């Protein structure tokens, strides 16, 4: 057992290896037709060298040790699983080269990603995979990545990009660190840790909950706390109330469909500047306009209908920016579909989000999850993993029958400069978010290198016509831009100037040498 340290040291050391309740939630809710991993599709200029990429990645894995650890369940389910060094880790089990029938198109890349994104990952290995995809037209290389949601959220994914990719075409060399995995703890040690940590973590959890509740109520005055509890209960009652389903709120078949499109980030920012609100308000206004059209196409009139969107909100403090795992709360935004005017809809959404923030709803949602996660780990595991109720139904099946939300929409800001992998420029990337609990479509918005990419992921049974929803999003974006009197702003490729400005000394010397050689040839001809 790990008893050579003091008890406090033991708990502190072990707890950082144990899944948090939020991380474990994504593990417990996973089902065969509902894999709970996130992902992305990347497109690179030129032919990305596979062996060099794999070696470069392997030389950096010591910076993210979680990617060489696998999930180990606790004995008898007495605690959440732990992350332990994988003694048989081999990068060959995680990085693959795939050749599509050449010349492969964007549709072929999408089809490959759809098949892979629908496939659950092997839990006996570290929960991540990368595929380098060959055979693409126009001398480009595709990449598909997936990481289990229990390891990472959107902000952590962006932090990971800063480790996997470079800001210049020159690939920095890292010395490959020897991998010396710690031995897997024995059954007795894991049982001891689970029991001990469960007791300590339970006390610590409720202490944090009391502190967070006090902060939520703006003080420790009992009257303020009681008022905060009532406000919290009222907010959550509305948040968890059943919804009227939209066409994509259906049972899942297991297959996935993906649709993406790029938009002008400059236009979105200009709309925000003209109309007010935040960039996220602009996104939600366009999404609501698209769903309004999609619902009407399926015979649903917008009158007396709302669109309830779950918007993840980052909880990371500045000192936690590099941390993995999930540190999020949620903002439940409920928008009337009856609003037809795009700018009026944007103003309404801004008012809604501002009021939610003023009423501290994100903090209330965080408290709700904190309260739910305060139950013992075996109870959480049993409830979310499929234990049946007295009626013979599982908790998840009951929640699916009355889903409290229509869709999840996440906005993940990325770097606004070009990134490179082993010298090849990342042209664009599209984030993928899992569908769950009969919310048959998810929307992910990413911003990178002055572009805004919108990706819809759907279960094919829930939204077989996903491309239509994306087309409606395109129309809604254009309608909002025109209504806001914002001119078209074509993306200006600044990366060539930036690349020239950030050339390495060696590349600058070679460029000068080529220029001098050219001048000599010209002079000799003269």
Image (cartoon, grey):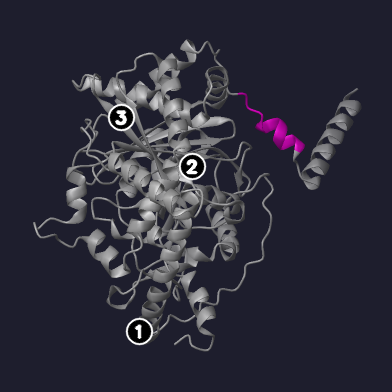
Q: Which residue is mark 1?
A: 187
Return the disc, 2 or 1, that comes first in the chain's sequence.
2
- Mark-to-mark CA distance, 3 and 2: 31 Å
Quick one: SS at disc 1?
helix
Up-down relation of residue 227 to residue 514 (above or below): below
Q: Position of residue 412 (x, y in %)?
A: 50, 40
Up-down relation of residue 408 to residue 19 (above or below): above
Q: Which residue is mark 3?
A: 307
Quick one: SS at disc 3?
strand
Return the disc, 3 or 2, that comes first in the chain's sequence.
2
Residue 474 found in image quarter = top left
Q: Which residue is mark 2?
A: 42
Return the disc, 1 or 3, that comes first in the chain's sequence.
1
Q: Residue at x 33, y 59 (%)?
A: 27
User: Can residue 145 be seen in the rendering of this structure?
Assistant: no
Q: Residue at x 64, y 48 (%)?
A: 166
* Quadrant of the rendering where the N terminus is positioned: bottom left
Residue 489 found in image quarter = top right
Q: Nearer the viewer, mark 1 or mark 3?
A: 3
Q: Nearer the viewer, residue 233 or 394?
A: 233
User: Can residue 526 be seen in the rendering of this structure?
Assistant: yes
Up-down relation of residue 407 to residue 276 (above or below): below
**Residues at discs 1 and 3 in contact (Cβ within 8 Å):** no
Q: Which mark is residue 54?
A: none
**Residues at discs 2 and 1 in contact (Cβ within 8 Å):** no
Left or right for 5, reference 148:
right
Quick one: SS at disc 2?
strand
The answer to if 33 sits in the magenta stretch is no
The answer to if 496 sits in the magenta stretch is yes
Q: Nearer the viewer, mark 3 or mark 2?
A: 3
Q: Nearer the viewer, residue 190 or 470?
A: 190
The prevailing secondary structure element of the residues shown in magenta is: helix
């Amino acid at each position: 057992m790990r008893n050579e340290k003091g008890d406090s040291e033991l708990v502190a050391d072990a707890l950082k290896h144990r899944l948090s309740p939020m991380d474990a939630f994504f593990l417990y809710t996973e089902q065969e037709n509902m894999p709970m991993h996130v992902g992305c599709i990347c497109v690179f200029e030129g032919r990305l060298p596979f062996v060099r990429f794999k070696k470069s990645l392997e030389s950096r894995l010591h910076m993210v040790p979680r990617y060489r650890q696998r999930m180990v369940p606790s004995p008898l389910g007495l605690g959440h699983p732990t992350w332990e060094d994988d003694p048989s880790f081999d990068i060959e089990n995680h990085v693959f080269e795939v050749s599509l029938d050449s010349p492969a198109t964007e549709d072929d890349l999408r089809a490959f990603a759809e098949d892979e994104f629908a496939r659950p990952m092997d839990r006996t290995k570290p929960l991540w995979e990368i595929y380098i995809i060959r055979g693409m037209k126009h001398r480009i290389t595709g990449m598909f990545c997936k990481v289990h949601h229990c390891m990472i959220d959107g902000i952590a994914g962006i932090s990971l990009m800063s480790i996997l990719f470079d800001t210049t075409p020159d690939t920095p060399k890292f010395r490959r660190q020897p991998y010396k995995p710690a031995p897997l703890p024995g059954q007795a040690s894991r049982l001891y840790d689970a029991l001990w940590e469960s007791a300590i973590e339970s006390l610590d959890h409720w202490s944090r909950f009391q502190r967070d509740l006090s902060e939520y109520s703006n003080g420790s005055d009992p009257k303020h706390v009681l008022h905060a509890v009532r406000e919290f209960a009222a907010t959550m009652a509305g948040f968890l109330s059943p919804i009227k389903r939209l066409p994509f709120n259906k049972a899942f078949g297991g297959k996935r469909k993906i649709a993406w499109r790029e938009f002008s980030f400059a236009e979105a920012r200009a709309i925000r500047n003209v109309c007010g609100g935040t960039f996220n308000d602009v996104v939600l206004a366009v999404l609501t306009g698209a769903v309004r059209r999609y619902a009407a196409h399926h015979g649903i009139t917008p009158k007396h209908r709302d669109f309830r969107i779950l918007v993840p909100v980052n909880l990371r403090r500045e000192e936690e920016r590099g941390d993995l795992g999930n540190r999020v709360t949620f903002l439940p935004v409920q928008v009337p579909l009856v609003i037809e005017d795009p700018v009026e809809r944007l103003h309404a959404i801004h008012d809604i989000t501002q009021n939610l923030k003023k009423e501290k709803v994100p903090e209330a949602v965080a408290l709700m999850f904190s309260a739910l996660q305060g139950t013992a780990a075996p109870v959480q595991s049993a409830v979310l993993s499929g234990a049946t109720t007295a009626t013979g139904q599982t908790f998840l099946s009951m929640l699916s029958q009355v889903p409290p939300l229509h869709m999840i929409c996440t906005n993940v800001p990325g770097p606004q400069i070009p990134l490179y992998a082993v010298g090849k420029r990342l042209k664009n990337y599209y984030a993928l978010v899992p569908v769950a609990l009969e919310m048959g479509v998810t929307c992910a918005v990413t911003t990178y290198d002055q572009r805004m990419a919108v990706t819809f992921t759907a279960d094919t049974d829930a939204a077989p016509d996903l491309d239509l929803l994306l087309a409606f999003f395109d129309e809604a974006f254009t309608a909002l831009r025109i209504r806001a009197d914002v001119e078209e702003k074509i993306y200006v490729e600044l990366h060539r100037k930036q690349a020239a400005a950030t050339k390495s000394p060696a590349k600058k010397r070679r460029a000068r040498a080529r220029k001098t050689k050219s001048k000599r040839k010209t002079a000799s001809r003269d």
